[in-house]
Structure formats: C-alpha cells, structure tokens
Amino acid sequence: MSLSKFFTASALFASTLSMGQSNTERIQALIQGQYDILDRATVKNNFADIKTAYTTVVTPDFKYILTSGQIFKFEPLLQQLELQTKATKKVDQAITKIAGITIKGNTATIKASSLYQAQYIGQDRKIHVLKTATTSEDTWLLQEGKWRFKSILIFGEKRLIDGKRV
C-alpha cells in the first residue's frame, strides 16, 4: 500500500474510532496515528519511506530542538536521518506514545514519550545496540484540515550503547 493511501486509510480509521469521543480524544487519536506512521517508517529503516512520512506531515518551518538547545530545521534533520539510516543495520523498535495533550484553538501541545532501539555499525566497524528513551513537548498545528507537526522539544533523554549509559 502506498503511503498516501495509508495516510488516508489511517485518517478514516481514526475518524471511525473517534465517534462518541470528545474532540480532544479524536484529535489525540489522529495525532497518535501520525506518530504510528512515522514509527513504522523508522522501523523499516528505509530512508525514502522515512523522508516521505515526515515530509507529508511537517510544517515548512518545522524545528527539532535538542536538550542542549541545538536546533535542527527540517532539511538538516533529514540529512541526519539519512546518515543514521545508512549506519543502522536494523531498527528493533520505534514507539512514540502521547502522555498528555492540550489543545488551544488550532494548536495541540503534546507530551510524548519515545522508545527506540537499533543495531548500528560503529566507527570501529562493529555492530552496537543503541537504546534511547526520550520525552518531548511536541507542537502540532491544524492547517487546511490536517494536523501538521511544527516542532519537537526534547526535554529528557536516556541513551544506552551496548547497555552502557552515554
């Protein structure tokens, strides 16, 4: 199934599920569906799929902000994702869950938690296991009837390589 058909099917499925739910619950289900699509693309570890999944959902001024304060705009972030995809042998899991949601007008502020585990080839040319657990505040905007990803602000991250905290 193409990603565009998958996005349409996901939106219809989420809309069907949301009957009888509050507006906040419906919006949360729609946005969780978008996270699920991004996570599935990540697990496939195919850069073309990852690029398509993100390009379809981010705003033109999307920002990814690290705990250090470093800011990545969308294109530099894509470049990092491409390098990461090339170095990754296998993605074991990518799971993002909404822990909380606040909606004001056309803006949804999400408290999200993400788990990621992958096997990658290190500079030593050996395979290593990377595990990360992050918490973030994500901003989504309703634009032209679709929820679009505006920013990710990472405020917590735990990273292990081969079981050792880094």
Image: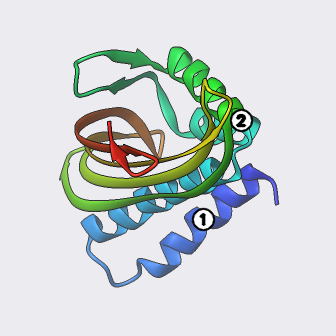
Element assignment for label 2: helix
The structure residue drawn at horizontal position 61% and vertical position 57%, both measured from the top left corner, is: 40
Viewer-closest of 82 and 120: 120
Q: Is residue 132 left or right of residue 139?
A: right
Q: Residue 72 sits in which quadrant?
A: top left
Q: Measure how far apart labels 2 and 1 are at the Cα level.
A: 21 Å
Residue 151 placement: quadrant:
top left
Task: Characterize the local packing of mark 2: few (<14), some (14-19) or many (20 or more) Cα atoms within 10 angstroms.
Answer: some
Q: Is residue 148 above or below residue 25?
A: above
Q: Which residue is mark 1?
A: 10
Q: For the residue carrying disc 1, how many other residues have a C-alpha within 10 Å: few (<14), some (14-19), or many (20+)?
A: some
Q: Give how far across and how far down residue 144 sits, in percent.
A: 48, 39
Q: Where in the figure is residue 52, as x and y percent of width and height?
A: 68, 37
Of the 4 image quadrants, the one containing the N terminus is bottom right
Q: Amino acid at mark 1?
A: Ser
The type of residue carrying mark 2 is Phe
Name the residue beneath numbered marker 2.
47
Q: Residue at x 64, y 24 (%)?
A: 83
Element under disc 1: helix
Residue at the limit of the structure toward the bottom, as seen here: 20
- State which tag comes first along the sequence, 2 or 1: 1
Residue 31 lies, with reference to residue 165, above or below; the image says below
Residue sitting nearer the eye, 26 or 159:
159
| Residue 103, above or below 124 | below
